[in-house]
Image (cartoon, rainbow, N blue to C red):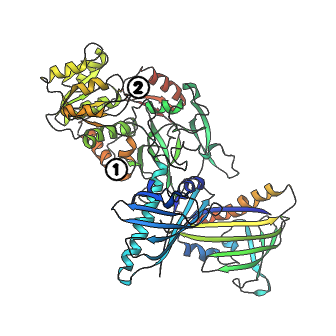
């Protein structure tokens, strides 16, 4: 007999982790190896004795029976009834324990079974790594992954998770223990605290508690903090990414001040930046899970990183992953003078495309021309789809980047070339409505509707875009305008100016 | 019956942490509030039933009896015989569990006791934070980077 035992710390409260794991039929929603699962006979999944029948992503089918379930001990045991592998007598259990010091969760996954001697090592490795450790990573990922829409979104989109019996997604990020009156001697930091949703006035500078970093966190002392339109939606409660009371902000650069006990590869003094949830960037210092931190090289300033990482990473996957822009292609970019628009115009031009941009005014047309657009259409003055057809001799655009939404979607479809690709990555003017996909066949249209998180929520996904964006900055393929800076205490003014569109270029806060 | 539970992640392998905490007479070496300790009647510190008699830095004296010690489960249970805390039927367990991911240790410290009505919250706070968490924090720092 062999015993396999794996354990980890998940940086979330035990109730949240247990809510996911106790669902005996819920593993297909988080474990990457499992394609689908159902309970034989349709019994409730928390019936001891229930049998789950599931399919692996590679086609294998298994049946497992629930032997024990305890909400008191947060423990679940099960055995294998049928499997395509010789895991004889396999009995496994999952148990959770709270880590009261830091509000995290200890998770142990163990099993015993009798493998054939010649396959022992192979099967132990499979169970330990492909099942247990892959499961740890998937849950960590799931808890971190919010429905983080594109930075250009104006409406909350549907959640990533399919609906299930347990209430696991989406969750608003629990207010950090910032107001907890712990008797521990705690450090504090200055931060913009939102205690109720509302206008810019709810952005108040407060002194809040700063606990020591958890095992998988680092503490960052911010030097420059990025301001994005999504922060406005968080402040107003339009997106549920900001729990109350809470600190908004998803983009910043700074210096690592302390590292958690399980951190490797990052040290005190390292310069880093990030552009991802959870919120909390509007602060002098914060703790942050380390895996999506980007190390800054000497030639990338903190100001550039904080002002452009989110937009640069977005532009990178829009131009390279969702559609690979090739020399000679006709690329139409809506809102070319906007934050992401400016990057798309410069970068698409650098990639050798013929760039057509739409803007709302002559002032913005001049900005976009300076950035290198071949043609600029002021859409308040002329119908942009007719203009695109005229400029392309009736051929249309090969790819269209459209974050405007309701006002432009129909025109974008009309401006596409045969086999053209419409990338709808936001809906600033409202939802695009319902469309009959059958009509797309008239020109073999491809439609993409990307979500930022799905291209950036693991280090493996994020790294190529960061590398590519920084390389483009170094080559001066793209340039970032000097951002407009505000003191952290004046975050409310920054939001007022952003909402009134009084600024062009990026806004940053200085702690 | 009042219960207290505290847990921490110690940044070291469980075997290393166990070497420190398994010594029933070793509190002065790692618990920041313990001044000195001896085992009564010259018994071995790993003999079940032995009594440790230690003084706190604030002058208090505590006598505790070793109820269980497991080198297999990495756990140690003891009962208070005498203390200034005015608790009855006090039994505590300190246990370690390996965290394979990163080769760390989960340290759990829990106690059950009876006390005068109305004193539960104060004692829970004193024992949970003032004793258990304070000692685990010291342990974390000892193994910390």
Given residues B29 and A404, the one toward you in this image is A404
Q: Please name the residue that numbered disc 1 is placed on.
A: A461
Query: Picture quarter containing residue A191?
Result: top right
Foreground disc of the pair 1, 2: 2
- Give the SS element for disc 1: helix
Most extreme residue toward the top, as rendered?
A: A381
Please rate how many residues cluster around mark 2, counting C-alpha atoms within 10 Å: few if below 14, some from 14 to 19, many from 20.
some
First in sequence: mark 1 vs mark 2:
2
Number of marks: 2
For the residues bearing labels 1 and 2, Cβ distance under 8 angstroms: no
Which quarter of the figure is the N terminus of chain B placed in?
bottom right
Q: Residue at x 79, y 64 (%)?
A: B58
Image coordinates for residue A203, horizontal then vertical, percent: 56, 30
Residue B101, disc: none
**Residue A200 percent coordinates (x, y):** 54, 25
Name the side, left or right, on which A485 lies relative to A178: left
Q: Which residue is mark 2?
A: A430
**Secondary structure category for the residue under label 2:** loop
Q: Does A23 appear above or below A169?
A: below
User: Mark 1 falls within which chain?
Assistant: A
Q: Residue at x 72, y 65 (%)?
A: B33
Q: Marks 1 and 2, Cα distance to the nearest angstrom?
A: 29 Å
Instruction: Work out whether A318 lies above or below B92.
Output: above
Question: Residue A342: x percent and y percent?
Answer: 30, 29
């Amino acid at each position: 007999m062999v015993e396999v035992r794996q354990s980890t710390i998940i940086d979330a409260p035990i109730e949240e982790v247990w809510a996911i794991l106790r669902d005996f039929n819920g593993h297909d929603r988080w474990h990457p190896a499992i394609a689908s699962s159902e309970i034989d006979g349709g019994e409730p999944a928390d019936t001891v004795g229930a049998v789950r029948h599931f399919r692996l992503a590679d086609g294998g089918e298994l049946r497992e029976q629930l032997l024990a379930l305890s909400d008191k001990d947060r423990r679940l045991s099960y055995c294998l009834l049928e499997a395509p592998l010789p895991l004889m007598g396999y009995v496994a259990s999952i148990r959770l324990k709270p880590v009261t010091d830091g509000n995290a969760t200890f998770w142990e996954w163990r099993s015993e079974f009798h493998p054939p001697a010649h396959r022992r090592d192979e099967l132990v490795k499979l169970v330990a790594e492909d099942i247990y450790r892959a499961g740890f990573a998937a849950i960590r990922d799931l808890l971190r992954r919010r429905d983080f829409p594109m930075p250009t979104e104006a409406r909350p989109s549907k959640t990533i998770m399919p609906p299930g019996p347990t209430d696991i997604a989406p969750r608003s990020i629990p207010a950090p223990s910032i107001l907890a009156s712990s008797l521990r001697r705690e450090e504090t930091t200055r931060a913009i605290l939102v205690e109720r949703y509302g206008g810019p006035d709810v952005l108040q500078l407060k002194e809040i508690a700063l606990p020591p970093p958890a095992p998988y966190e680092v503490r960052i002392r911010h030097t420059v903090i990025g301001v994005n339109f999504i922060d406005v939606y968080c402040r107003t409660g339009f997106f549920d990414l900001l729990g109350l009371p809470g600190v908004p902000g998803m983009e910043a650069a700074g210096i690592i001040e302390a590292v958690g006990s399980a951190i490797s590869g990052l040290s005190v003094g390292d310069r880093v930046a990030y552009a991802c949830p959870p919120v909390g960037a509007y602060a002098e210092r914060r703790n942050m899970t380390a895996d999506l931190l980007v190390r800054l090289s000497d030639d990338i300033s903190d100001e550039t990183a904080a002002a452009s990482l989110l937009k640069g990473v977005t532009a990178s996957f829009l131009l390279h992953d969702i559609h690979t822009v090739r020399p000679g292609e006709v690329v139409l970019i809506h809102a070319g003078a906007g934050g992401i628009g400016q990057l798309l115009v410069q970068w698409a031009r650098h990639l050798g495309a013929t760039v057509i941009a739409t803007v709302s005014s002559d002032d913005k047309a001049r900005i976009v021309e300076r950035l290198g657009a071949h043609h600029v259409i002021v859409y308040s003055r002329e119908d942009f789809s007719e203009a695109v057809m005229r400029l392309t001799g009736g051929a249309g655009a090969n790819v269209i980047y459209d974050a405007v939404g309701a006002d432009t979607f129909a025109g974008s479809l009309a401006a596409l070339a045969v086999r053209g690709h419409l990338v709808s990555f936001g809906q600033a003017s409202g939802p695009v409505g319902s469309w009959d996909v059958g009509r797309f066949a008239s020109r073999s249209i491809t439609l993409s509707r990307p979500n930022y998180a799905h291209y950036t929520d693991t280090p493996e996904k994020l790294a190529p875009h960061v590398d590519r964006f920084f390389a483009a900055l170094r080559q001066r393929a793209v340039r970032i305008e000097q951002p407009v800076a505000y003191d952290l205490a004046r975050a409310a003014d920054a939001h007022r100016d952003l909402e009134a569109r009084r600024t062009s270029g990026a806004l940053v806060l200085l702690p | 019956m009042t219960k207290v539970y505290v847990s921490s992640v110690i940044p070291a392998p469980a075997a290393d942490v166990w070497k420190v905490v398994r010594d029933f007479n070793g509190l002065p070496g790692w618990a920041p509030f313990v001044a000195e300790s001896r085992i009564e009647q010259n018994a071995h510190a790993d003999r079940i039933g032995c009594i440790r008699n230690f003084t706190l830095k604030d002058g208090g004296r505590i006598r505790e009896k070793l109820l269980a010690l497991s080198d297999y489960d990495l756990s140690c249970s003891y009962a208070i015989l005498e203390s200034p805390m005015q608790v009855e039927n006090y039994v505590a367990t300190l246990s370690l569990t390996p965290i394979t991911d990163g080769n760390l240790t989960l340290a759990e410290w829990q106690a059950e006791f009876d006390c005068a009505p109305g004193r539960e919250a104060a004692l829970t706070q004193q024992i949970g934070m003032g004793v258990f968490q304070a000692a685990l924090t010291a342990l974390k720092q000892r193994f910390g980077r």
